[in-house]
Amino acid sequence: MSVGHRVSTDRQLARLLQIGVVLEEVVEVRAARHYETLSPDERDADIEELLAEAREESADHRERLEALVDRLDADPVPLSEVEALVEAHYAQTRPEDFDGILYDQLNGEETAYKFYDDLIEAIESNDATFGLDREELLDTLKEIREEEAEGVEEVAAVMEARE
């Protein structure tokens, strides 16, 4: 199931929210790994702050999404199935140089933004009733999408400052 499909059941919504959880885990883990791979010469306050904020933001998003899934009246999809789906559709190769790390971080932020944008559109395109308050659901997803957009801007600003 892709986000492009109509979201009309709690199970479909739960699965898509679980995909968001896994995407956030990927961004969180990759941000931590990126910082660990930087040489001491490449580490600076801007990069350290950018990657720390990315980890914290992704952890917050993951927790918010998990809370929504927990409130849905749906059997969750096995995590291994969701992880395989994310791996198949959103996997990236590991960057080996400093610029690659920034591009990878930018790609992660953009991917998450696009995912939430598509999910919001899929929910808004129908009048399905879910086991969650529709406005609360959309407000949460829009807040997360906005934070992802800010993340894209922050990474782009660091990249531009390094040129």
Image (cartoon, helix red, strand yellow):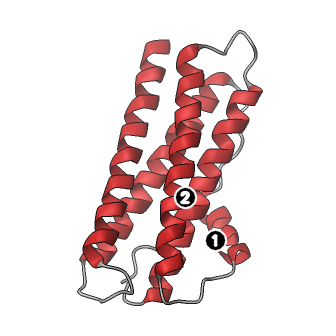
Q: Is residue 1 visible?
A: no
- For the point 44% across and 14% down, the residue is 161
When the figure is inspected, residue 53 is found, relative to residue 159, above or below; the finding is below
Residue 52's label in the rendered image is none
Q: Nearer the viewer, residue 66 or 161?
A: 66
Tag nearer the camera, 1 or 2: 2
Q: Quadrant of residue 35?
A: top right
Quadrant of the rendered image containing residue 114 = bottom left
x, y percentage for residue 155?
46, 30
- Specify the amino acid type for callout 1: Leu
Residue neighbourhood size for the residue with mark 2, other residues' Cα within 10 Å, grouped as few (<14), some (14–19), many (≥20): many
Residue 45 location (% of width, % of height) = 56, 15
Q: Image height check: is 162 above or below 148? A: above
Residue behind mark 2 = 62
Disc 1 crowd rating (10 Å Cα; few below 14, some 14-19, many 20+) is some
Q: Position of residue 94 (x, y in %)?
A: 72, 41
Classify mark 2: helix, strand or loop.
helix
Instruction: Give the mark nearest the N terminus, 1 or 2.
Output: 2
Q: Nearer the viewer, residue 49 or 4?
A: 49
Q: Nearer the viewer, residue 79 or 62?
A: 62
* Residue at 59% in and 89% down: 75
Give the residue type that dot 2 points to: Arg
Q: Residue, x 48% and y 52% (percent of image)? A: 111
Q: Is residue 92 visible?
A: yes
**106 is higher (above) or lower (below) than 78:** above
Residue at the disc numbered 1: 85
Q: CA distance from mark 1 to mark 2?
A: 17 Å
